[in-house]
Image (spheres, helix red, strand yellow):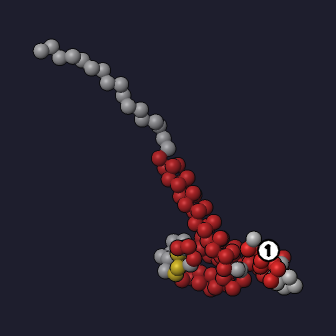
Amino acid sequence: MAMETYASRNPEQIHTDVLSKSRQACYKARDAFYACLEKESAKKPTEIGSVGLLYPLECKASRTEFERNCRASWVKHFDRLYCKNKRVQRLLDDKESRRGPLSLPQPYTFKPTNS
């Protein structure tokens, strides 16, 4: 319903930010930002992005470029996706460290005392 109303208000308007060249520029900026984030992951994050994403100051320029080339809703979507993937990866890595021989409880043999 909302999309129909939006389309009927602007039937002749072409949104250039969803055209192929603009999307490719957005993806390129996104990839550059997340590559910087991975490269600088050892540094303390001081800047705040959308949805609680923290990133170091060294990535501020690529973040600005990312926000300039992409729609705000796309930036938020990509940030959520990145955070979700990092959370899943952290959980999977955590499971690897706990792997090893299974320690099952030893059967308890009850020996009655003679009283």
Q: Nearer the viewer, residue 46 or 48?
A: 48
**Relative to residue 35, is residue 84 depicted above or below?**
above
Give the class, few, some or many, for how many residues have Cα within 10 Å of label 1's Cα (few <14, many ≥20).
few
Where does the image place residue 74, in percent across and percent down from the top left? Answer: 69, 74
Residue pushed farthest top?
Answer: 114
Res 113 → quadrant: top left
Q: Nearer the viewer, residue 97 or 17?
A: 17
Q: Toward the viewer: 7 or 98?
A: 7
Q: Quadrant of the N terminus?
A: bottom right
Q: Which residue is mark 1?
A: 4
Residue that sits furthest to the left in the current view: 115
The quadrant where residue 107 appears: top left
Pick the quarter of the image with the C terminus. top left
* Residue that appears at 59% across and 62% down: 84
Residue 35 place in picture, x, y as percent: 65, 72
Where is residue 32? Give x, y as percent. 68, 76
- Report the residue at 36% width, 28% height from top: 106
- In the picture as drawn, the residue positioned furthest to the right comes out as 12
Query: Would residue 112 appear left or right of 65 to someone viewing this image?
Result: left
Residue drawn at x 60%, y 68% is 80
Left or right, 40 with reference to 17:
left
Q: Is residue 98 left or right of residue 21?
A: left
- Amino acid type at circle 1 is Glu
Residue 86 at least partly seen: yes
Q: Quadrant of residue 105?
A: top left
Question: Residue at (51%, 49%) from the top-left corner?
Answer: 95
